[in-house]
Amino acid sequence: MVRCDKIKILEHLILTFGFERYDTGAKMFQSLVDVSRKNLFASPMFSQARCETAQPTIPAVTESAPPQLTEARQIVAAATPEEVSCEFGSTKYYALCGFGGILSCGITHTAIVPLDLVKCRIQVDPAKYKGIFTGFNLTVKEEGFRALGKGWAPTAIGYSMQGLCKFGFYEIFKVLYGNLIGEEKSYLYRTSLYLAASASAEFFADIALAPMEACKVRIQTQPGFANTLREAFPKIWKHEGASGFYKGLPPLWLRQIPYTMMKFACFERTVEALYKHVVPKPRSECTKPEQLIVTFVAGYIAGVFCAVVSHPADTVVSKLNQDKGSTAIAAAKKLGMAGLWKGLFARIIMIGTLTALQWFIYDSVKVYFRMPRPPPPEMPESLKRKLEAKDN
């Protein structure tokens, strides 16, 4: 009973302060939720969204039930309320996904601020900061240990907002696009589906991240500019206005959208491959801790690819926010081809660990709140029959 009360309280807080206030962003989010709920279980990729231990039951059709959801419940047997805390595709489901994104991105990015600080300094001043260890030693020697925590506040705020949009919108767009193309194409072109959904989600996530990212990089790479968010934010606003917060948005898109596309698509396919070729038993027979281990491993593999794909644009973002009045093209030319890849090793370590922990935290949130967790996608029966008929 206490756990149920906590879930209800959390749901109320999320819906009240996150998605259902007066701003246009909330209205847009709610409209996407409404659209994604139509024909919700058309794709088999989402048709088994229930706890693996649940015993299927088909609820009776009532006159008061909405037509789309009644049909969905007939197509897919839903778990009982005691087994899951919310219905797949409901507003509460997407709200909790957003909350999981806040925790996964906010906590992990804040925890690695010292490594991120050194990485940024290597990118913008490679002559002075020649490597990870040199960067740490010089920073501590010149500014003390406290300097390693510079930029933690904009990091915590900015990446929490980014995580909210990244994971919340990804779940919405994945269902929405899956419904648009149908069940067979959702399976055949599932990698493209993951790429499209993650790119769409990251587009909005970067808009939420950009102002805090600008403050963070200035604090970390411009000596004497500011030591805290309270100093940096009004200073940027006073001298550059709103453009100062968003001048790094285009290269941020160039960095984050490929990164997120790789992060989600690689993770989804790696999880599928691990359960198919490595894990000796189906996911439904794995314990929750075993499933979370698979999540962590798949997340780390995805993170390594993410770091390589997004590193040049990340270097440009760091240099752009350091040099006032510079442009993305000018920053790239100034860095040169070799300069674009400075700090790659530090970024691989950082992003690999970061991505693995993010997926681990995100999946743990789903387990803790007893959210529906779809198993790896399976080929729909209609497609199997078509293939069999073609072979015969």
Image (spheres, rainbow, N blue to C red):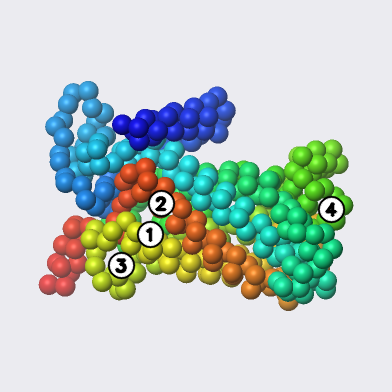
Q: Reading the chain from its start, which is encountered first: label 1 or label 3?
A: 3
Q: Which mark is on residue 324? A: 4
10 Å crowding of disc 3: few (<14), some (14-19), many (20+): some
Q: Name which quarter of the figure residue 347 lies in.
A: bottom right
Amino acid found under the numbered disc labelled 3 = Tyr
Give the alpha-carbon distance from disc 2 to disc 4, as whole Å: 41 Å
Image location of residue 333, percent across then percent down: 78, 68
Q: Mark 3 vs mark 4: give the one in front.
A: 3
Q: Amino acid at mark 4?
A: Lys
Q: Which residue is mark 2?
A: 364
Q: Amino acid at mark 2?
A: Ser
Q: Are marks 3 and 2 in contact (CB under 8 Å)?
A: no
Is residue 79 in view from this perspective? yes
- The answer to whether residue 205 shows anywhere in this view is no
Where's residue 262, x and y in %? 50, 63
Give above or below for 198 relative to 95.
below
Figure quadrant of the C terminus? bottom left
Q: Quadrant of the N terminus?
A: top left
**Mark 2 falls on what kind of element?**
helix
- Measured along the vertical axis of the image, is residue 271 above or below residue 161? below
Disc 1: which residue: 292
Asked if marks 1 and 2 touch (Cβ < 8 Å), the reply is yes
For the residues marked 3 and 2, what is the alpha-carbon distance in whole angstroms? 18 Å
Image side of residue 283 versus residue 302, left or right: left
**Side of 153 where 199 appears, left or right:** left
Q: Secondary structure at mark 3?
A: helix
